[in-house]
Amino acid sequence: MVIVFITITLKYFMLLIHQAFIQNMIKYIERDYSEDNNYSEEDKETILKYVKKGGNVCIFWLCAGFGTCVTFPLKAFASMFYLYWKGEFRLVPMFEITFPEPIESYKNSIAVFWIWFAMTFLFDLYATTMNVGFDPIIPICMLHVCGQTALLSRRLTRIFAEIEDPKEIQAQLRFIIIKVQSLYDFIGGIKSSFGLLFEVNMKSTTFTLPLIAFQIVESEIFRQEIYASGWQKCSDVSVRHTILLMLTRARVPMGVRSVFYEMSLDTFAEVIVMKDVPPRLRHLQFDECGMGVVDEL
């Protein structure tokens, strides 16, 4: 209970401290959908897709939070009813806790029991409201970024398929770059404001791990969409330089990271192999026949 109390109270103080930033986040999301109303049907479907996912996140936390809230008192009342049915009735608290003396000697008295039961039930409601009110914020923002990257990917694909003028292509790419940079700034603000709390959540629960993986995968898909957008059709050097800059910038995933970092699978495999090689042989390279060749310095 102490760990839960500290985590929940930390969330409450974070909401108080960063309430202006949270208001700006909400305005940023609303502005993204109000700036450009000329969405195609596919774009509208993409927007609705991620809006529904954000709604599902809220519904999940609402059900999980209040479901957990009623579990503990129901368990206590069900246990007392079962013991009464067996003829062994005794008072069952919501949380089994050993108190210091002399409270421990009186915890089974009716007055002390109901006072403690009311206090734990209020704590249960307090934890539920904070979990339901705070935890969906970051996943919803991450889903919004995923939706925006999907829209930018579709827009980038249409640029090289429908436009031939290099200047117009450059203008469209400039708009996409500005938009991508604003998304990075948006994620950066979330990391700087809620990084500490996100670290605590990473240590205390694994519910956020699938959402982080989803965000990083969506960001990598956007980078692949940049490369596969058809830029080879345009021979303008400035356009190709812009694409190169976009690919370089998109190497950093738009995700809220904690102690986990990306690693190349090839590099990881090489580390695993080399750890079993004797130190004196680590400077050798092997040719196709498996013969050792001294690495040139």
Image (cartoon, grey):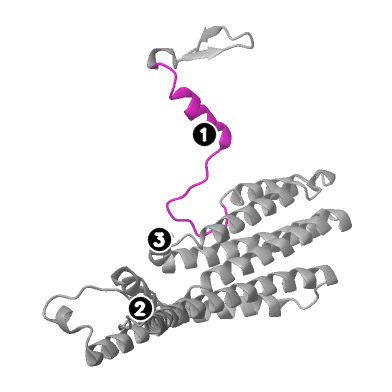
| Left or right position of 30 against 228 | left
| Label 1–label 2 contact, CB within 8 A | no
Type of amino acid under label 1:
Phe
Specify which label sits upstream in the sequence, 1 or 3: 3
Q: Element under label 1?
A: helix
Type of amino acid under label 2:
Phe
Viewer-side residue, 12 vs 141: 12
Viewer-side residue, 31 vs 279: 279
Residue that mark 2 sits on: 13
* Number of other residues with Cα within 10 Å of mark 1, as a class: few under 14, some 14 to 19, many 20 or more: few
- Characterize the magenta stretch by its predominant secondary structure: loop
Which residue lies at the image location 41% right of the left edge and 80% below the top edge? Answer: 82
* C-alpha separation, residue under disc 1 versus residue under disc 2: 40 Å
Q: Which mark is residue 137?
A: none
Viewer-side residue, 191 vs 232: 191
192 drawn magenta: no
Which residues are the magenta region?
253-278
* C-alpha separation, residue under disc 3 versus residue under disc 2: 15 Å
Which quadrant of the structure image shows residue 176?
bottom right
* Number of other residues with Cα within 10 Å of mark 2, as a class: few under 14, some 14 to 19, many 20 or more: few
* C-alpha separation, residue under disc 1 versus residue under disc 3: 25 Å
Which residue in the rendered view is the most extreme toward the left? 102
Residue that mark 1 sits on: 268
Specify which label sits upstream in the sequence, 1 or 2: 2
* Number of other residues with Cα within 10 Å of mark 3, as a class: few under 14, some 14 to 19, many 20 or more: some
Residue that mark 3 sits on: 199
Which residue in the rendered view is the most extreme toward the front? 87
Q: Element under label 3?
A: helix
- When the figure is inspected, residue 152 is found, relative to residue 270, above or below; the finding is below
Which residue lies at the image location 57% right of the left edge and 32% below the top edge? Answer: 266
Residue 136 point in image, percent of width and height: 53, 73
